[in-house]
Amino acid sequence: MKLTKFVPLFTGLFLLVSGCAFFGSGNKQNDASVADEVDSGEQTLYAEAQRYINNRDYKAAIARLELLEAHYPFGRWAEQAQLELIYANFMMTDYDSAINAADRFIGLHPQHQHVDYAYYMKGLSNFQRDRGFFDKLLGTPEPLRDVSSARTAFTQFEALLTSFPDSMYARDAQHRMHYLRNVLAEAELNVAYFYLRRDAWVSAINRAREVIEHYPKSAVVDDALVVLIEANHKLGLKDAADDALEILSLNFPEWKGFNDEGELVIRSAIRNKDRSFINTITLGLLDRPRTTAILKLEVPDSETPRPPKSDES
């Protein structure tokens, strides 16, 4: 009798424990299923974005990448999607968005293995933003154009080289900095010419010094020295003019302004490159120089690199 009383109780406990085990197993399976769905959804969005990028449909790619980042901010592909967003916005010529995406990536992942790509693309975005200006500047320059983007690009490439000297983008950054250095120096020189045309001698001197002090490796240092010579000569500052002339003669003996007797002729190139001479300073320091060709700058142009893949991607 006592045994029969315990049978229902034992049976009930067995069913209860079995039920708990059954439902517990179901929860684990459900969790795994949800995780698989998450991985599948994230990977699908990333794969679609890659397909659109390969087909150069950058607008659609950006939409997929932004959706991926919004739904899976800590997912497997989130960081790579942020890098791809920089590239896709750049290729859309939306340079502001590319720069913002690069800044965001740098802020979120300062130690990322490919953070140098974000630095590089910031500089490249500012470089490309003013490409039309660069072409005009080197063709028919206007003296008071805004060169802030060019200056920013130079600074950003410089930051890349300082922080990541061994970066795969370092060589291209150096090439572009060389070009930008000449562009910025030429812009300053054009402002100096602008002041010379208005007989603003002190302002012309200040701009010429800017070229010589900040862009000593540029291609227009010789022209900046000539501005110093003329402006100081006009102000009656003979010693300063002579000092600049000595520097010019020693460092640029073949400068185009020396005549057959080695005398410096200040050409109307300072005022108007197509007019006759306006002034001659005769010192006869040098023998007849050889005429050098006018430097022509070529805009660096290379294929924009896709972001590299992270190790975990």
Image: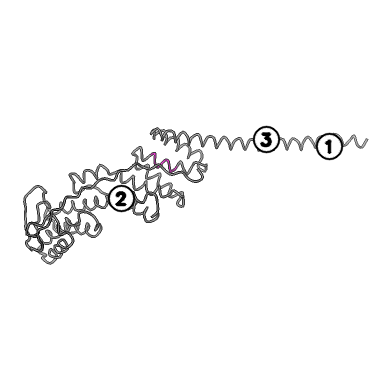
The residue labelled by disc 2 is 175
Q: Earlier in the sequence, mark 1 or mark 2?
A: 1
Span of residues in magenta: 82-88
Q: CA distance from mark 3 to mark 2?
A: 61 Å
* Cβ–Cβ under 8 Å for marks 3 and 2: no
Say which quarter of the image contains residue 2. Answer: top right
Q: Earlier in the sequence, mark 3 or mark 2?
A: 3
Nearest the eye: 138 or 298: 298
Q: CA distance from mark 1 to mark 3?
A: 24 Å
The residue labelled by disc 3 is 26
Q: Position of residue 191 (x, y in %)?
A: 18, 52
Residue drawn at 33 percent across, 39 percent down: 93
Q: At label 3, which amino acid type do we have?
A: Gly
The residue labelled by disc 1 is 10
Residue drawn at 44 percent across, 48 percent down: 114
Mark in front: 3 vs 2: 2
Q: At label 1, which amino acid type do we have?
A: Phe
- Left or right relative to 244: residue 27: right
Q: CA distance from mark 1 to mark 2?
A: 83 Å
The tally of labels here is 3
Image quarter (top left, top right, bottom left or bottom right) of the N terminus: top right
Q: Earlier in the sequence, mark 1 or mark 3?
A: 1
Nearest the eye: 261 or 132: 261
